Image (tube, grey):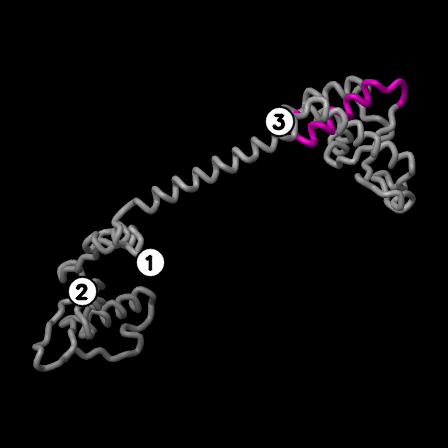
Amino acid sequence: ISTIFGAETWAVLQAVTHAHSSVTLRIDCKAAVDVLLSGRDKAVRPSRMTARAWADVFVATGGDPPADVSWMPAHTAASDVGQRWLGNGELLSDLDRQGNDEADRLAKAAVQAHRVPRHIRMEIQRQEVRDMAWWVAQVTLAANAWGPQALRDSESAQRIRRRTSGNCAHGRPARQEIPVMLGGHDIVQPPQHLGCRFHCRICRRSAKTRASLCYSRCPGSAVQRWARAAALAAASGDPAGSGHYLLMT
């Protein structure tokens, strides 16, 4: 048992084991109340770390939860009596409050019997702080000593690798120009003294730079586009040319 829920489970086990008659439980741990009232099957399922303790609880109670089990608020004041509600819909009584305070007092007294002395706990805490500070110092020293010293904070190694990786960006291969035979543009480079744009001799598209055309597919000449449109119209039953009069010059 290493959790608050485990300690509450152990307290429930001690209460039902040492009770001489019907037991009345007022528990300030809502999770423990929910498990107890959910029944034995859910309380002892294999995934629960405290399943063995809950199995003993239900052995002591005859397999069913006690008849009078309720959640109660913890760390209450005298002014809360008759003002705050329990889980069963009743108001907090003075007996409920006294019982809860006495249980907390006995639990703290039991802990002091085997608790590690304060000076040892403080020394362990200081040692943990020193170890953490020493680890941070080592990491900082190693980080400052790594890599080219000329690099600025704004220049990362990842950016350096991208700049020196040639034409590849993010590990992907560079784009390839599409040949004319595979559907690319037939680009004509105009003379520099004319100041004209690059254009395709097939589809007549033009662009300011060659890269705007060489990586895309050519849609074909106007004659080819009209022929495809006429074929689609004929296949769908429409008049050839969709009403246009085709004339090749």
**Which mark is drawn over residue 47?**
3
Where does the magenta region start and end? Answer: 1-22
Circle 2 residue: 214
Q: Residue at point 27% right, 72% down?
A: 240
Q: Secondary structure at mark 1?
A: loop
Circle 1 residue: 154
Q: What separation in Å lies between label 3 and label 2 (alpha carbons)?
A: 63 Å
Magenta stretch encompasses residue 51: no
Residue 190 at what x, y percent from top left?
Answer: 10, 76
Q: Secondary structure at mark 2?
A: helix
Quadrant location of the N terminus in the rendered image: top right
The prevailing secondary structure element of the residues shown in magenta is helix
Residue 243 at what x, y percent from top left?
Answer: 30, 78
- Compared with 230, 123 (above or below) is above
Q: What separation in Å lies between label 1 and label 3 (alpha carbons)?
A: 50 Å
Q: Nearer the viewer, residue 15 or 244?
A: 15
Q: Residue at point 87% right, 24% down?
A: 23
